[in-house]
Image (tube, grey):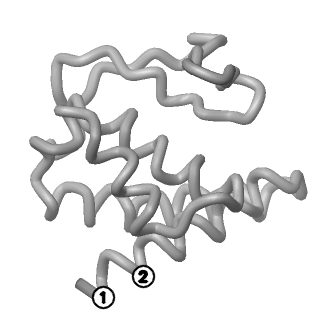
Amino acid sequence: MVFAGPILSHSDWTPDNVVVSEDRAWLLDWAWPTLGAAWTDPACWVLRLMASGGHTAHEAERQASRLPASQAADPEHIDLFAAANVRLWHEIAQAGTSDWTIKMAQAAKSWADCRQAH
């Protein structure tokens, strides 16, 4: 129940679903809206920042920590989320060969490894 909550989450952070301009970002295509903990979308953001190649795990977490929901998250819950995403993205990457799913699988593994090292 650590991922459960009353907050509407986007939960589908594919590259085409996030449009970024100079001063804001939009989440498009709300095909997978999910009720969950408030910190789940910021945690998904960590993975996307890492997969884009522009952020280490520490840098991506620092960006996410700017959001109150991320600041309030239990670190053990984030650890579980990171570990769950390793399994999720590994399975997705095995089923397809798109570049972004492979990058997401690599980012998930790197993030979980970083969190375990704490």
Q: Badge 1 local density, few (<14 within 10 Å), some, or many (20+)?
A: few
Q: Position of residue 74 (x, y in %)?
A: 10, 53
Q: Are marks 1 and 2 in contact (CB under 8 Å)?
A: yes
Q: How much space separates mark 1 and mark 2, taking CA atoms?
A: 6 Å
Which label is found at residue 113?
2
The residue located at (16%, 44%) in the rendering is 71
Residue at 14% in and 64% down? 76
Looking at the picture, which amino acid does disc 2 mark? Asp
Q: Is residue 107 left or right of residue 58?
A: right
Q: Secondary structure at mark 1?
A: helix
Locate the N terminus and report the quarter of the image it occupies.
top left
Question: In the image, residue 42 lies at what x, y percent?
Answer: 37, 38
Spot occupied by residue 28 in the image (x, y as percentages of width and height): 64, 12
Label 2 environment density (alpha carbons within 10 Å; few <14, some 14–19, many ≥20): some
Instruction: Please provide percent x and percent y for residue 23.
Output: 57, 20
Residue annotated with mark 1: 117
Q: Nearer the viewer, residue 108 or 51?
A: 51
Which quarter of the picture shows residue 37? top left
Q: Residue furthest front?
A: 22
Q: Report the label total.
A: 2
Can you tell which quarter of the image residue 118 is in? bottom left
Q: Nearer the viewer, residue 10 or 55?
A: 55
Q: Which mark is residue 20?
A: none
Q: Hey, what amino acid is under mark 1?
A: Ala
Residue extending furthest bottom? 117
Say what secondary structure mark 2 lies in. helix
